[in-house]
Structures are given as structure tokens and as C-alpha cells.
Image: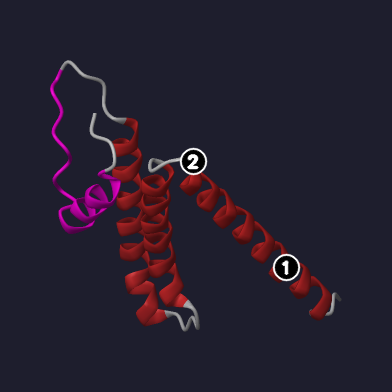
Amino acid sequence: ARAGNRVSDLGLALALPHRQPAAPADTPPDTHAVVLWAAVAGWYGVMLLFLPLAYTISMVDKHFFVAIPLLVIATAAVLDWLWQRGRVLHGVTILFYLYLTASALSLWLTRIIIVRQE
């Protein structure tokens, strides 16, 4: 199995969703490739689902439904690439997750404090 080409696999998957990576028939499918293609298929599904809804329903943040899955997939590919580069970048990846957790918790608590519960 190839290692370190997750970012290029992501570009291929987004550009050519109908072409899956070829593998010999006697080898089990690469777990990363299966997850990647499932994520891209899900992203395209969300995009196709919300495209007609965007014209009929007034949603302020409707662009997030298309953009966020792509950002999550791309971020996962970059974090996977960083993780494979050594112990120092393991720390960078862990710090990113800690920052993301602290940021989400802070926003959630701020929302609970500011919004009046009825």
C-alpha cells in the first residue's frame, strides 16, 4: 500500500469521483482508500441534496452544508500526512485536536451563557 499520498488521493477523488484507485483482485481494499471514497461520496451526496433546497428554502448558512464536509476531508488528509512525518508533527497534530476541542467547548459554553433559556 502507498503511504504519504493521502492528499493527492483526495485531489483525485474530488476531481474524478467515478474512478476508484485500482488494486489487484487478491489484495484486500486499502482502508484509507475506502474511507476516503466514502467521505467524498457523502460530500457529493450532501451537495446534491442541498442544491435544490438552496433555491426553495431561505437558509442563511446553507453554504456551510457544502463547504464544511470538504474542509473536514481536506483537514483529515493534511493531519494524516503530518502524522506520518515523525514525532514532532505528532505533537502538532495532537495540539490541533486539543485546540479544536477547547475552541468548541468555549463556543458551546458561551452560547449557553449568552442565550437566555426559556
Q: Residues within 10 Å of mark 1 (few under 14, many from 20)?
A: few
**Three-letter amino acid code at the position of disc 1:** Ser
Picture coordinates of residue 64 (x, y %)? 45, 72
Q: Residue at coordinates 40% horizontally, 45% vertically from top-left?
A: 80
Check residue 82 in the rendering and tell me which mark sits there, or answer none: none
Q: Is residue 106 above or below residue 44?
A: below
Q: Residue at coordinates 41% horizontally, 76% vertically from top-left?
A: 63
Range covered by the magenta-colored residues: 5-25
| Residue depth check, mark 2 versus mark 1: number of the one nearer the observer | 2
The residue at the far right in this view is 118
Q: Is residue 22 above or below residue 25?
A: below
Q: Residues within 10 Å of mark 2 (few under 14, many from 20)?
A: few
Give the quarter of the image for residue 22.
Answer: top left
Judging depth in this view, the residue of 47 and 68 nearest the camera is 68
Q: Is residue 42 above or below residue 48?
A: above
Say whether residue 53 is magenta: no
Say whether residue 18 is magenta: yes
Picture coordinates of residue 21 (x, y %)? 17, 38
**Counting residues from the N terminus, which is met first, the one under dot 2 or under dot 1?**
2
Residue 88 left/right relative to 49:
right
Q: Which residue is mark 2?
A: 87
Secondary structure, mark 1, is helix
Check residue 106 in the rendering and tell me which mark sits there, or answer none: 1
Question: Gap in Å between the C-alphas at discs 2 and 1?
Answer: 29 Å
**Three-letter amino acid code at the position of disc 2:** Arg
The residue at the far front in this view is 88
Residue 111 left/right relative to 59:
right
Q: Residue at coordinates 35% horizontally, 81% vertically from top-left?
A: 55
Residue 66 left/right relative to 11:
right
The C terminus, quarter of image: bottom right
The N terminus, quarter of image: top left
Judging depth in this view, the residue of 8 and 61 nearest the camera is 8
